[in-house]
Amino acid sequence: MQATTLAEATETLSLLPDWEQRYTYVIELADTLPPMPQAEKTEANKVRGCTSQVWLTHTWNTGKLNLHLDSDALIVKGLLALIYAAYNGKTAAEVQSLNLQQALESTHLLQHLSPNRRSGFASVIARIQSLAKPAQ
């Protein structure tokens, strides 16, 4: 599967008739996530608040966020692909202004995730948004 934009992913999710097909699509999205170098999968790069192991690293390049995300769970990796599509390559202002949970509301995807998965999803987004906050 080719990399997708957030708009393409939400459109596809909205067109799928039931949550099982949406779930399958999210798992397929896992293949679109660029691979994270093994050396970046460290304890320091783990996202707290996730039941599965989730790693996040980033750089800022010419004012744009470059993310590396990975998980040991396939469904989580698919959810990370949605996060990647939403935030990678965005400016700090764009990262701060995007409410991904709201953007996905019409897909009904998040309501079918377990509370732990929803919490982990929110933890990853919160960590990304904290990267875009101005230094105090």
Image (cartoon, grey):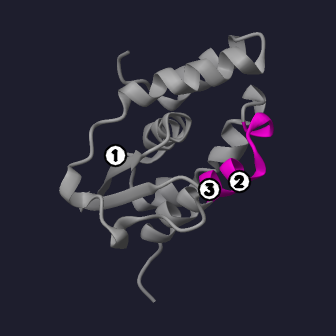
Q: Position of residue 105 (x, y in %)?
A: 76, 36
Q: Which residue type carries mark 1? A: Gly
Kindly tell me whether residue 11 is visible in this rendering: no
Q: Residues within 10 Å of mark 3 (few under 14, many from 20)?
A: many
In the image, which residues are magenta?
110-122
* Side (left or right) of 85 relative to 114: left
Q: Are marks 2 and 1 in contact (CB under 8 Å)?
A: no
Q: Which residue corresponds to mark 1?
A: 89
Q: Which residue corresponds to mark 2?
A: 116
Tell me which label, 1 or 3, sits earlier in the chain. 1
Q: Residues within 10 Å of mark 1 (few under 14, many from 20)?
A: some
What is the CA distance from the residue labelled 2 to the residue labelled 1?
A: 28 Å
Tell me which label, 2 or 1, sits earlier in the chain. 1
The structure residue drawn at horizontal position 49% and vertical position 41%, both measured from the top left corner, is: 73
**Number of the front mark, 2 or 1:** 2
Q: Residue 105, relative to residue 125: is it above or below?
A: above
Q: Which residue corresponds to mark 3?
A: 120
**Number of the front mark, 1 or 3:** 3
Please name the predominant secondary structure of the magenta segment in the image: helix
